[in-house]
Image (tube, grey):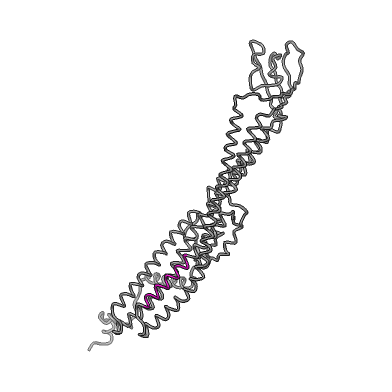
Amino acid sequence: MKSEANFRHSPRSLVGNPWIPCQWPQGMTILIVLLLFSLIVEAQTPASAPLPDLSVTQVLRMAEAASPDLKAAIERERAAEQNIRVFKSFYYPTFDAQAIDSYGFPGSSRDLHIVSGLMSSAFRSGPAAGITANLDLYNAGRQYAVRTAQRELDAVKAKTQIVRYEIDQRALGIFLDASRFRGQEEAYNQIIKEVLGVEKEVNHYVVTGQRSVVEKLLVHDQTADAQMTAASFHERYGVALERLAVVTTSTASALSIPTPQRVPEEALGLIKISYQSPLVLQAIAESAVAHSEVQQFSAQNYPKLQAIASAGDVDEARLVSKKYYSGGFGFEVPLFEGYRIDAAVRQAQALASARDSDQLAVQMDIDQINAHYDEIIRSSRVKLDYLQDEADAAGQAFHLAKERYFTFQGTLVDLREAIRNLARVQSEIIDVKTDLLLAAGSKALLNGATIQ
């Protein structure tokens, strides 16, 4: 028999003895401590809250703020405003500082178009310098040019509203696409939960020999079909968020869109309705521009009255006494321009008549589109009333078919048909509600709606 001392020092006695402490490497100990610490921190860290759903007005506002087309349209408005200032400037006198010197035959340089007044006089000799002022006392064409520029500004503003309408319409369509896909995904996820519960019970019955394997396969096929549909809508929802991220210059991970059930029709009431469609306003503005151009071309037949004055000094004067100022009035009446003015007036009248017809055509198109939207809105509201009753009946039919099947009073055919009917009704409710929201929002935007 081995002694107790020999046993303690025996190498084999240390193997597999749980009561003899082991000495861990220092690095392993540190790793275990860090792992435990990370697990504790992760357990105490609250889960990230889901993103809040965006509203329609929030998405439209983001799309407008990010649109380069709208920024360009606003800059065109500013350019048109400055164009009015350009034409209004002709109401004010112009002052020019001028100087001239000449050599050779006297008076031959007076036709220089950069000098006038004293500096262009044929009686001047030697260098001359001074200030010249010009003023249109009467020029009807200038007045109508200013009026035309103001009408053009109205037309540019109407085009800006059309750009805004197109941006909002595009963003609204993408918003409701994402809403539709998310609603369908959630609806089929709920169907999956119901079918998985049925499949679990069927598998139990198959194991106990109370149901056939065929029923198990049929129920599993229905589960797989619902999972496939939900996965498809999940991917489509993700793509719709990516599309929305493009028009809002955001990221898809930062966007969340509610389902159609959580977007009441009254939410579109946040959009303020104007009196007329931007398309009609543009047609009206362009017609006004055309009629103003008719008056502008006709004004070329009117007389013109202009005044000029100058003050300065010339080196010497020939034949007359030297003076330090000059002034005068000019009167012009067009008599014959080779029918140029008449042709321009007739051309402007034809274009104005065409613009009037365009305005009527646009109004007719708007009326037809509004009637189409009204058709969708009214029919969708009627469908939703009936579909809600169908949904209640489909839910009762499903629960009754499931209860009868589990109590061996009904068949799997009834249960599968009840599941299909429930999925169909819920899916149709989402589609009809989305169509209703899209038609109501599109009609509001078409008729001059703007976000507050």
The quadrant of the image that shows the N terminus is bottom left
Report the label total.
Answer: 0
Horizontal side, residue 270 vs residue 258: left or right = right
User: Magenta includes 441?
Assistant: no
Residue 194 vs residue 352, the one in the foreground = 352
Horizontal side, residue 149 vs residue 395: left or right = right
267 over 411 or under it: above or below: above
Q: Residue at x 57, y 37 (%)?
A: 350
Q: Tell me where residue 193 appears, x and y as whole percent.
A: 41, 75
The quadrant of the image that shows the C terminus is bottom right
137 over 357 or under it: above or below: above
Q: Tell me where residue 207 appears, x and y as whole percent.
A: 30, 82
Name the dominant secondary structure of the magenta segment: helix
Residue 126 vs residue 437, the one in the foreground = 437
Horizontal side, residue 264 vs residue 147: left or right = left
Which residues fall within the magenta stretch?
414-431
Q: Tell me where residue 75 appears, x and y as whole percent.
A: 58, 44
Q: Is residue 256 visible?
A: no
Q: Residue at x 56, y 55 (%)?
A: 445
Q: Tell me where residue 37 appears, x and y as whole percent.
A: 44, 71
Q: Is residue 119 visible?
A: yes
User: Magenta includes 423?
Assistant: yes
- Corner quadrant of residue 96: top right
Q: Residue at x 39, y 66 (%)?
A: 231
208 over 356 or under it: above or below: below
Horizontal side, residue 159 vs residue 299: left or right = left
Q: Residue at x 67, y 13 (%)?
A: 107
